[in-house]
């Protein structure tokens, strides 16, 4: 908005974010409400919905049946999963939508504390920021640093050569899979930093990759696929 209109409008911003995120997101919640009760009652021979399987499965760390209730559903509709409520049903990947939504609210509020044209706007933004910061978990706030790094990349010029960037990413991936650090989120932080270097290096590439058109086509519906892929895969596997 600032680049196009030269000013920030909360009404337009929230309408844009809401229309992009919420319709497909709410549809994903309804899909879980439809599939999970059927699968957990009639198709749960393998125990995928209630931890009834033998060996641990990393992608199924919870008893999904216990998360299939009205309170979880309503909490998820206002992006309070992982804060006050568990993720609804079997759709574990929806944890990230709560993080994303609160970043979209918190970032412009913090900017408004310093950039709002009127004092009342600054004070209001500050109060709302304090309330949100008090509600969010430490993990959401920490991962917000990665989110900010991605946003900052759009404003940077190439500063890293391609080969060192890829080497750093490979090293970070190897470290994350072979070492167990006592420092919380160290592996994630190294991977995030290395990937930022790769993205920065990509700014200097002379031409697009051969598969760019396919990637753009996939990106046009990747969000919707992300929202529903896990409950559909779990339902199909159980059936």
Image (cartoon, rainbow, N blue to C red):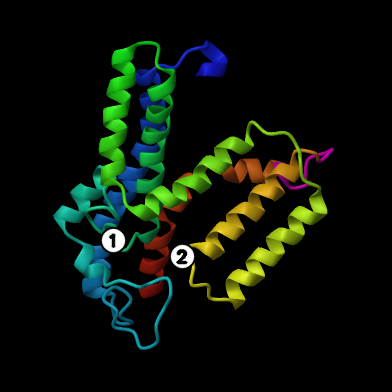
Task: Give the structural element (helix, strand or loop) at label 2.
Answer: loop
Characterize the magenta stretch by its predominant secondary structure. Answer: loop
The residue wearing badge 1 is 35
Q: Quadrant of the C terminus?
A: bottom left
For label 1, the crowd category at 10 Å Cα-Cα, with few meaning under 14, some 14 to 19 and many 20 or more, is: some
Is residue 206 shown above or below 185?
above
Q: Residue at x 34, y 20 (%)?
A: 122
Write the residue at 75% across / 53% down: 165
238 left or right, relative to 34: right
Q: Quadrant of residue 4?
A: top right
Q: Which residue is mark 2?
A: 184
Label 1 element class? helix
Task: Between residue 216 and residue 114, name the one nearer to us.
Answer: 114
Say whether residue 171 is left or right of residue 152: right
Q: Is residue 209 magenta?
A: yes
Res. 220 in view: no
Name the residue located 58 percent from the left edge and 54 percent from the top edge: 192
Q: Which residues are magenta?
A: 205-212
- Report how far apart the C-alphas of labels 2 and 1 lie in the structure: 35 Å
* Residue under the image location 80 percent in, 50 percent down: 162
Left or right placement of residue 50 versus residue 153 in this view? left
């Amino acid at each position: 908005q600032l680049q196009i209109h030269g000013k920030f409008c909360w009404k337009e911003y929230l309408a844009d974010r809401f229309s992009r995120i919420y319709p497909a997101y709410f549809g994903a919640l309804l899909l879980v409400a439809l599939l999970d009760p059927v699968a957990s009652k009639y198709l749960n021979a393998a125990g995928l919905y209630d931890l009834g399987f033998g060996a641990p499965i990393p992608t199924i760390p919870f008893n999904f049946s216990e998360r299939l209730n009205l309170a979880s559903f309503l909490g998820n509709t206002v992006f309070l999963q992982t804060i006050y409520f568990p993720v609804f049903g079997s759709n574990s990947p929806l944890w990230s939508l709560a993080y994303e939504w609160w970043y979209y609210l918190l970032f412009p509020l913090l900017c408004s504390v310093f950039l709002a044209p009127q004092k009342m706007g600054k004070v209001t933004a500050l109060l709302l920021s304090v309330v949100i910061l008090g509600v969010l978990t430490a993990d959401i706030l920490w991962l917000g640093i990665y989110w900010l790094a991605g946003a900052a990349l759009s404003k940077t010029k190439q500063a890293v050569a391609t080969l060192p960037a890829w080497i750093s990413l490979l090293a970070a991936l190897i470290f994350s899979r072979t070492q167990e650090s006592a420092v919380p989120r160290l592996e994630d932080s190294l991977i995030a930093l290395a990937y930022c270097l790769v993205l920065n290096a990509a700014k200097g590439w002379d031409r697009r990759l051969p598969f760019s058109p396919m990637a753009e086509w996939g990106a046009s519906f990747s969000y919707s696929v992300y929202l529903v892929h896990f409950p559909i895969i779990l339902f199909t596997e159980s059936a």
